[in-house]
Image (spheres, grey):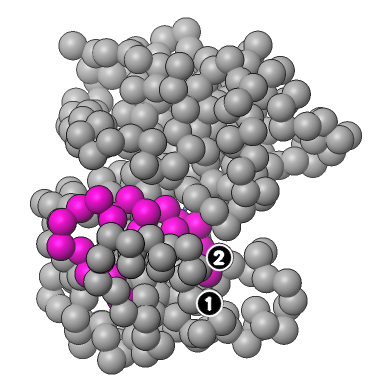
Amino acid sequence: MRHLMRPLDFSVEELNALFDLAKDIEFNRAKYAHACDGKILATCFYEPSTRTRLSFESAMLSLGGQVLGFASASSSSAAKGESVSDTIRTVSCFADICAMRHPKEGAPMVAAAKSKIPVINAGDGGHQHPTQTLTDLLTIRSLKGRLDNFTIGFCGDLKFGRTVHSLIHALVRYENINFVFISPDELKVPDYIIDELKEHNIPYEEVISLEEHIGELDLLYMTRVQRERFFNEEDYVRLKDFYILDKKKMEKAKEDMLVLHPLPRVNEISVEIDDDPRAVYFDQVQYGKYVRMALILTLLDIKVD
Ligand code: CP
């Protein structure tokens, strides 16, 4: 039995196979429509979500399976004090696979240790969000045709943004990636990630101005300032609109630069660029469903001929 806790739980070869499967699903939906007949996915979400939970559920339904779960801690027995370990033992009696989101870093790992079914980390605190990373990698591979040889800018809340941490972690394994980290001083990438880049001799810059650096980028990964992880409202209000990507800034970007965002967005991307062909954040959402379908099949070891 296999779980997914971090992007590096899959080798580069396994990721390639997963992305090939996701592409086959994208173009041959009918072939997979009964692949999970009789199987049940549990979504145990202790934190709010729109994309991750609904894309997991949509993925399982499109594979012919069924879904159950809870969308908030308050609607589960966590509200009565039940531990994650006891919850997953219970869920293991009802479902074949579980996607779990939790505000505490490491909670899905605690669940995996006690689980009788595969557990997928659907986001744990400010730590990791591996299925968003699978989504991001599939989007880049599909739209750029490669996962190497590019300069990627991460902009916004690089301190608390788990999608940022997961994606950097995954990209370290590909050739000739240059990182440009664009954030205010208060929201810089955590030291442990910088240490990892130094250890692998991977080039990176830490800068403040988006306008000055947008022209260097092949990919721009925008992020929301994570209000829910701030210790005080005053700091959040001061930093929340530090970056706003608009038409004027996009004029300085390369013609083939892609703008990604894990969503939800608040103000950091103006709606005026939603129709720019370089804005691919809603394509990302669609890729997220295909890659989660591929992940469910892979973790349940279901092959479709
Ligand atoms: N990208 C992402 O995790 O979105 P949700 O919080 O809506 O699931």
Few, some or many C-alpha atoms within 10 Å of disc 1 (few <14, some 14-19, many ≥20)?
some
Name the residue at 28% across, 55% down.
171
Quarter placement of the C terminus:
top left
Above or below, 74 relative to 263 = above
Name the residue at 24% across, 20% down.
30
Q: Amino acid at mark 2?
A: Phe
As measured in the structure, the alpha-carbon distance from the residue carrying label 2 to the one carrying label 1 is 7 Å
- Residue 77: image x %, image y %? 81, 31
In the drawing, does residue 227 fall left or right of residue 25? right
In the drawing, does residue 8 fall left or right of residue 31? right
Q: Is residue 163 magenta?
A: yes
- Residue 5: image x %, image y %? 48, 38
Residue receiving disc 2 = 160
Q: Earlier in the sequence, mark 2 or mark 1?
A: 2
- Residue 198: image x %, image y %? 33, 67
Q: Amino acid at mark 1?
A: Leu
User: Badges 2 and 1: C-beta atoms under 8 Å apart?
Assistant: yes
| In front of the other: 170 or 276 | 170
Image quadrant assignment for residue 55: top left
Residue receiving disc 1 = 187
Quarter placement of the N terminus:
top left
| In front of the other: 103 or 278 | 103
Dot 2 beta carbon under 8 Å from ligand 1: no
The range drawn in magenta is 159-180
Image quadrant assignment for residue 102: top right
Above or below, 84 relative to 247 = above
In the drawing, does residue 242 fall left or right of residue 37? right
Q: Secondary structure at mark 2?
A: loop
Q: Is residue 162 magenta?
A: yes
Instruction: Tell which residue pokes out farthest to the top in this image.
Output: 38
